[in-house]
Amino acid sequence: MKRAAISTVLALLGLAAGCTVGPRYSRPAAPAPAPDAWKTQPPWEQAAPKDAIPKGSWWQVFHDPALDAYEQQLLQANQSLVAARDRLDQARSLARVATADMFPQLSADPSALRERAGANRPLNGAGPTLVSVPGLPQPITVYSQDTSYTQSVYTIPFSLSYEVDLFGRVRHTVEAANASLQSTAADLQNVQLVLTAELAADYFSLRELDAEFQVVEKSVGYQRTGLDLVNNRHSGGIASGLEVAQQAALLDSTLSQLALVQQSRAQYEHAIAVLVGQAASSLSVPVAPLQATPPPVPLGVPSDMLERRPDVSTAERVMAYQNAQVGIARSAFYPHITLSGSGGWQSRDLGTLLNAPSLFWSLGADALEPIFEGGRNRANLAAARAVYDQSVANYRQSVLTAFQQVEDGISNLSTLSQALSTQGAAVEDARRALTIANNRYIGGVTSYLDVITAQTTLLTSERLQTQLLGQQMVSSVYLVKALGGGWEASEIEDQQVRPQAGQILQP
């Protein structure tokens, strides 16, 4: 009998595997063939793929210990990242919930009841009465319709049910749950990538403002020296009051720019504080002017993008989830077969509750076959297919967006590299022009307006040079982000829940 039971179970499992309905999942093709190479050539010599982007700590490619420290604080204390980890834990638990339907469900519902039935009850049943019969050692119970009775009822019932998953409804549900789990895992990685990139961008923007403050502060020093010169010449009757007023106005304007730079720096400092999980008032970033150059970023080939972007993996896992939902909707057209059984003990007396005569049981099977549903199942299937098609379009759009962001990043760096080179020459020209203007003014050849113009041009040129360097570093950050930050889709493959035999005995 034991062998027969095992054979029956194996036969049912084999039949179930063969009867599964619903589409098998395969990742749709990208909207267009991926190009063999990126359109824009980067402004550096190509590095070997994956050599310069550390896995999980992509910001180390910039070799900035202060940035590394802030990123580690973010990983530990950023509340958005904590919430994303909690969502992953929730998705893992929900996947375990889905696997529970693959096992029999056993429940118990013990009860104790004390009841009294009235003599005038409308039912035709009879109440129990003990009657002594000559020749019998114990009285027997007889029933009279017009008598009341009081009795106790003790019950320990058990119920067992198991859905025979012949058409794959449960298996598709587990597939959907695991796809949702992996999608949430990719979401977590995307949140981490976005937050760490935002921190790095804010950090380099703050460092650029430190350098820009230094430039403006140096210009303030030059302009104060110029104001002293004009004041001295005015006292000697050489310079006019107009020249003094013009130089004073320029100095005041530059001091205003200095205050605005400080204001912008404070805002970036506050943003960094929030990203690393601190109150804005509790974090002070030491001043350290930007003195960095963008590192070469290994681009790889465009087709790698499908495996290196967590947001693309999220969209792909959503497709897998919706494909499983189509299978679930399809299984609704087929019988829903449930095996069930119940049993236990019931007695009027607690002392005889567990005796053999108190035992009761029942076994049965139920096959629910939808016949006429008013088109409900057909509409549900059509809706599931439409949602799947929508997820395919969203996936393909995410691929196109990823290609665009990488091309934008390479193009930005190429343009900024050229602009920074020419701007360096512009700064040198402005410095030479200021020297010439000062000499011509002291020699009485020209008015002081030429000196003011040269000072303004030099300040503008130096600030622009510093801003271009900051933009170059921020663009490098966003390019690494667009490439996925060293992440690979294989990192979420282990994020799935499989049915375990031990679940049978778990509540």
Image (cartoon, rainbow, N blue to C red):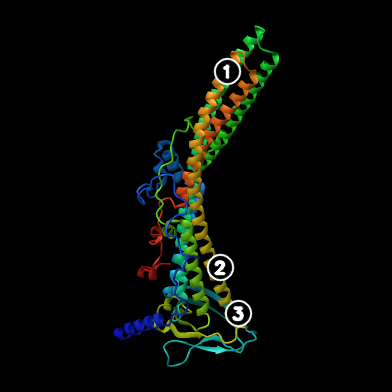
Of residues 424 and 72, which is closer to you in this image? Answer: 424
Q: Which residue is mark 3?
A: 376
Visible residue check, residue 112: yes
Q: Amino acid at mark 3?
A: Arg
Q: Residue furthest right?
A: 242
Q: Amino acid at mark 1?
A: Asn
x then y, percent, for residue 174: 45, 70
Report how far apart the C-alphas of labels 1 and 3 lie in the structure: 87 Å
Visible residue check, residue 192: no
Q: Amino acid at mark 2?
A: Gln
Count residues near mark 2 (Cα–Cα under 10 Å), then give few for <14, some for 14-19, many for 20+.
some
Q: Which residue is mark 1?
A: 438
Please, is residue 277 above or below residue 385 in the view?
above
x then y, percent, for residue 472: 49, 41
Count residues near mark 3 (Cα–Cα under 10 Å), then give few for <14, some for 14-19, many for 20+.
few
Per the rendering, the mark at residue 390 is: 2
Asked whether the residues under the numbered discs 1 and 3 touch, taking CB atoms below 8 Å apart as contact, a structural biologist would say no
